[in-house]
Amino acid sequence: MKRIAIFASGKGSNAENIIKYFKSSNKIKIQLVVSNNSKSEALERAKKSGVKVFVFNKIELINGTLLRVLKVHKIDFIVLAGFLLKIPKKIINAYLNNIVNIHPSLLPLYGGKGMYGIYVHEEVSKSQDLETGITIHYVSEIYDDGAIIFQAKCPLYRNIKAKEIQKKVHKLEIKFFPRVIENLLNVKN
């Protein structure tokens, strides 16, 4: 049984989708949802699904408290699903090639510090790109710079608004993120 911790800071729709996807799995269990935001909807969504939650602050992320919590819960794999803080080197080293993130663009386009959520879609809209998508990648010490695992694209049209782009990209996230996680963990079994 592979135990996953989901890190989330916001609404938690991806976290909830992943929890539902693996609910009946006998190989993969969502063990824990953690957040730096006590008001994150991801925490409520997790609780409703019977998943344990843990709220931490930036100091606890850096000083090793969160890493100890992950070890206590025997976490094998970490999924960042709308998590906004940089992962410290201690956690990256402890979970080398076992931390993945989803980014709402086709990296290396529109990645880096401050590029998340609607901010990414606004840049795509301003640039008049004719396609965008998602990138699932390993987490490194640099924002959105880890090795790319998977990308999926969707077509756009001229003058499309950021909110419309966000809806198209979210559909890709919901469709592909759990499947890619499952494939990664099946490779490691």
Image (cartoon, rainbow, N blue to C red):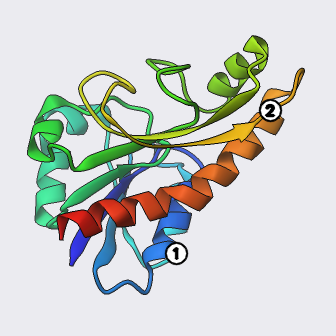
Residue 16 in the image, given as x and y percentages of width and height: 54, 65
Indicate the amino acid at tag 2: Leu
Q: Is residue 157 above or below residue 68?
A: above
Q: Give the label, 1 or 2, closer to the camera.
A: 2
Front-most of residues 157 and 31 = 157
Residue at mark 1 to residue at mark 2: CA–CA distance: 29 Å
Q: Residues within 10 Å of mark 2 (few under 14, many from 20)?
A: some
* Quadrant in which the N terminus is drawn: bottom left
Q: Is residue 76 above or below residue 91?
A: below
Which residue is drawn at the image coordinates 38% and 60% (left, top)? 181
Count of numbered marks: 2
Q: Residues within 10 Å of mark 1 (few under 14, many from 20)?
A: some
Residue ID for mark 2: 156
Residue 71 in the image, given as x and y percentages of width and height: 11, 59
Residue 3 visible (yes or no): yes
Identify the secondary structure beneath mark 2. Answer: loop
Front-most of residues 92 and 32 = 92
Which residue is drawn at the image coordinates 14% and 67% (left, top)? 74
Question: Which of the two labelled residues, at mark 1 and mark 2, occupies the earlier sequence position?
Answer: 1
Front-most of residues 114 and 107 = 107
Image quadrant of residue 75?
Answer: bottom left
Residue 151 left/right relative to 130: left
* Quadrant in which the C terminus is drawn: bottom left
Identify the secondary structure beneath mark 1. Answer: helix
Residue 118 in the image, given as x and y percentages of width and height: 68, 29
Residue 13 visible (yes or no): no
Q: Is residue 130 above or below residue 176?
A: above
Residue ID for mark 1: 20
Residue 133 left/right relative to 158: left
Front-most of residues 75 and 128 = 128
Q: Residue furthest top?
A: 127
